[in-house]
Image (cartoon, rainbow, N blue to C red):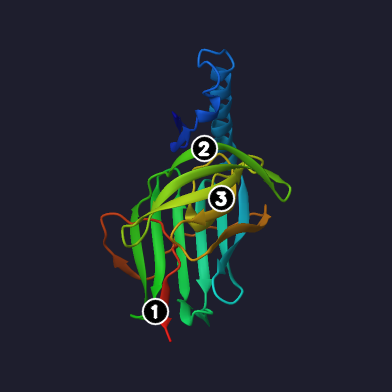
Amino acid sequence: MANIALLKSDNFQKINITIDLKPLNQYNMKNPLILPYLILLGLLTFMVSSTQAQVQAQIVYKRTVTLGQGDHFYFDTLKFSNNKLLYIENHKMDQWWTEQKWRITIHPEDRKRYINMNTQELVDQQFNFEKKHYELKKAKEAPFEWTLLNEFKKIGKYKVQKATTHQIAFDGEKLEVTAWFTPEIPLGVGPDAIWGLPGLIIEMRIAGELAGGYALESINYNPVSISIPNKGVLVTEEKVQSTAKLNKLMTKN
């Protein structure tokens, strides 16, 4: 493995990437082609960081849950501007039965997560349906540490590369995240407010969630307005992890 940590001086955005060099082990590491390969990848990451600071976009991700009778869909919206993102989840409760007589309940969600990728500021506003009010959490969102794999494929018109990282769930469980991203869209963001890759995430799967995943539905390069969420009772925590793990309740008939 080779580690690359880039710090862009004008916006203080740090990107942590680990490159899987196993596919290159068949070559001598003294081969003059190896160093240019690593330099090129590093420059690509730097250019994505520079370009995305100038881009504004609204992205919609389709979240699919495949369990029981057919697929169930939800749509999340990601707004991006000037290295700031706002991830919006808003869906009603959904409930269905499996063939094994398990009842699956997806609880309603009303949540906005704001992240300043330069300062790593996180503001998480979420409606508490039990207490009937919004809760506001503030913390630092450290960059995700990604491992880039030497696996490529086509998703629609995009050539994508595989990458993995880990996310800490609300219960402290460490979940593996598998993403397919494309440098063709120089925005280092993705579903569930996950960020830090040298390109937009096109598809993503979080281990431990209900079967299914996230897929890019649409992207529009229009000016967007991003406001920091400020509604609700402030909840004090030492650290808030960005997670959008589907809250599921399974009961047997």
The kind of residue on which mark 3 rests is Ser
Give the CA distance from mark 1 to mark 3. 30 Å
Where disc 2 sits, the SS reads: strand
In the visual, does 212 lie left or right of 136? right
Where disc 3 sits, the SS reads: strand
Residue 74 in percent (x, y) is at: 57, 69
Residue 245 in percent (x, y) is at: 44, 63
Picture residue at 47% right of the left edge, 76% below the top: 108
Where is 47 relative to 245, above or below?
Answer: above
Where is 26 relative to 118, above or below?
Answer: above
Q: Earlier in the sequence, mark 1 or mark 3?
A: 3
Picture residue at 55% right of the left edge, 75% below the top: 68
Q: Earlier in the sequence, mark 2 or mark 3?
A: 3
Residue 204 in percent (x, y) is at: 55, 53
Residue on which disc 3 sits = 81
Packing grade of label 1 (10 A; few <14, some 14-19, many >=20) is few
Give the CA distance from mark 2 to mark 3. 25 Å
Q: Are marks 2 and 3 in contact (CB under 8 Å)?
A: no
Q: Are marks 1 and 3 in contact (CB under 8 Å)?
A: no
Residue on which disc 2 sits = 148
Residue 145 visible, this angle:
yes
The disc at residue 129 is 1
Q: Nearer the viewer, mark 1 or mark 3?
A: 1
Q: Nearer the viewer, mark 2 or mark 1?
A: 2
